[in-house]
Image (tube, rainbow, N blue to C red):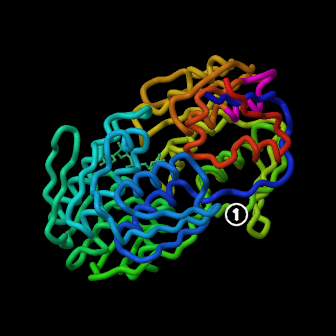
Amino acid sequence: MDKIIIKGGKSLKGSVRVSGAKNSALPLICATLLTSGAHRLKNVPSLKDIDTVEKLLTSLGAVIVRDGHLFEVDANNINCFEAPYDVVRTMRASVLVLGPLLARYGRAKVSLPGGCAIGARPINLHIKGLEALGAEIELEQGYLNARAKKLRGARIHLDVPTVGGTENLLMAATLAKGETILENAACEPEITDLAYALIGMGARIEGAGTDTIHIQGVDELYPLEFSVMPDRIEAGTFMVAAAMNRGDIRISGAVSEHLDALIAKLREAGVEIKEEDDVLRVKGPRKVESVNIKTRPFPGFPTDMQAQFMALMTMGRGTSVITENVFENRFMHVCEMQRMGANITIDGNTAIVQGVKRLKGAPVMATDLRASASLVLCGLAAENTTEVKRVYHLDRGYENLEEKFRQLGADICRVQE
Ligand code: UD1
C-alpha cells in the first residue's frame, strides 16, 4: 500500500489549478442514466471515486469512454438495475443511481450503505422522498428494492437539507408526472451544477441554489453536454496549506463565491486573500490567529473543510472552538493530530484547539478523505518527517495531490510500503 512522505517546513509558492469537483461529477454521471443518447461530460477529475462510478454504470449496461478529463456515456442499453453492496460500501454516492433508474425504468435495487467513518449517515430522506413521488420501496436482505409504474410530482419537505437526497429527488422528479416542490432542499453549489446540467437536458427546474426547488416533470430528456464545476474543497485545501506555511500561492479555476464562508474565516485568521481575475491569491500570515468555526450546510462553513481548518488552528495564536453540526462523528483526525503535538480536547461535537508553536512530524493515518487531507496539511507545516498512510482515502477525492503540492515547492512524495 502506498504512503505519502512529507518533509515539513517549506514555504509554498507558485500556482496551482483546481480540478473538477468530485461531488459534482458523481451525480452528473448518475444523471446520464435518465436518458439514452451520447452524453459528454468535461472536466471530470481522475479519481478513485470516478473509477468506482464508472464500474457501477458499466455493470448496469452503460458504455463509457474516457479520454483524460472527458467522460462519455452511452446509456442506451441499461439491462441491470442493481447497485451491489460491495460498490455502495466503498462509495456511498452510488445510491445516486436510485432516483434516475426509478424515474426512467421504474425499478432499482440499491444496497443500503450502512455506517461510515464519520457517522451513521442514513438515507431515510432519499427513501421518504421517493415514496412521496409514488415509489414502493421494500428492504430485502440489506437492499432497497424500489418500484414505480410512473413517478408523480409531490411536495416534499426534507427534515434536513441533505445534499445526496436533494440530488436523488431532483433527478427523479425531472421525469415524474406533474410538479414536484422540494422544500428545505440543500443549496450547495453542486446542486446548482446538477440543476443546470439537467436543464440543459431539457428538464424544467426553478430555484436550485435556494431552499425551495420547483420541478415540472417532462416526458423526455436529451443527452447531457456539460463541464463539471471546479472543486471548492480542493481549492479550500490549498488555501489552508498556504495559510499554514507563510505561502504565497495563486489558485486558478476556483469560484470564490463557493468559498465565501471559508474565505471569511481565513481572513479572520490573518490570511490575505485577493481575487485577481479568475485567480485567488492567498498569502499566509507570520502568525495565525485562532478563530472559531461551526460547520453548517451551504452557505455556512462546509463540514468537508472542518478537518483542514482544524489543522490550521493547531498553530493558531490562542484558542479555537470548532463545532461540527453536520456529521455526528467527524473528529477522527484529532487523535492523529495529537500524535503530531497538537493540543486538542473534544467535548461532544465541539473541539477546543489550543494553538502550539510547531507541530512535530509523525507516522499518521486517517479513516476518511478530508481527515487524510488535514494530516497532509499538518505534515507540510510540521518539523521533520511525516508519513501519511492509507493514501487510498486521498486518491478518492484529490487529483494528483502530491504532484500539485510539489509544484508549489513542498517536499512530498509517494512511496510503496
Ligand atoms: C455530501 C457530500 C459530502 C459532504 C456532505 C455534507 C457527496 C458525494 N458527498 O454527502 O462530501 O460532507 O454532502 O455537505 O456529494 N441525513 C439524514 N438522512 C438522509 C440523508 C442525510 O439524516 O436521508 C443526514 C446525514 O446523516 C448528515 C446530514 O444529513 O448528518 C447531511 O448529509 P448529506 O447532506 O446527505 O450528505 P451526503 O449527500 O451523504
- Left or right, 405 with reference to 26: right
Question: Circle 1: is it few (<14), some (14-19), or many (20+) Cα within 10 Å?
Answer: many
State the quadrant of the N terminus: top right
Q: Is mark 1 within 8 Å of ligand 1?
A: no
Q: Residue at x 24, y 67 (%)?
A: 105
Q: Is residue 115 magenta?
A: no
Asked whether 175 or 378 is in front, the reply is 175
Magenta stretch: give its range: 376-386
Asked whether 204 or 354 is in front, the reply is 204
Q: Residue at x 61, y 59 (%)?
A: 20
Q: Secondary structure at mark 1?
A: loop
Q: Is residue 385 magenta?
A: yes
Residue 391: horizontal and vertical position, in percent?
61, 33
Residue 318 seen by the camera: no
Residue 60: horizontal and vertical position, in percent?
34, 57
Residue highlighted by disc 1? 253
- Left or right, 331 with reference to 341: left
Q: Residue at x 19, y 70 (%)?
A: 151
Asked if 135 appears above or below 179 in the picture, the reply is above
Residue 26: horizontal and vertical position, in percent?
47, 57
Residue 261 seen by the camera: yes
Asked if 328 appears above or below 52 in the picture, the reply is above
Residue 235: horizontal and vertical position, in percent?
66, 52
**In the figure, residue 352 lies in which quadrant?**
top right
Q: Residue at x 59, y 53 (%)?
A: 261
Q: Amino acid at mark 1?
A: Gly
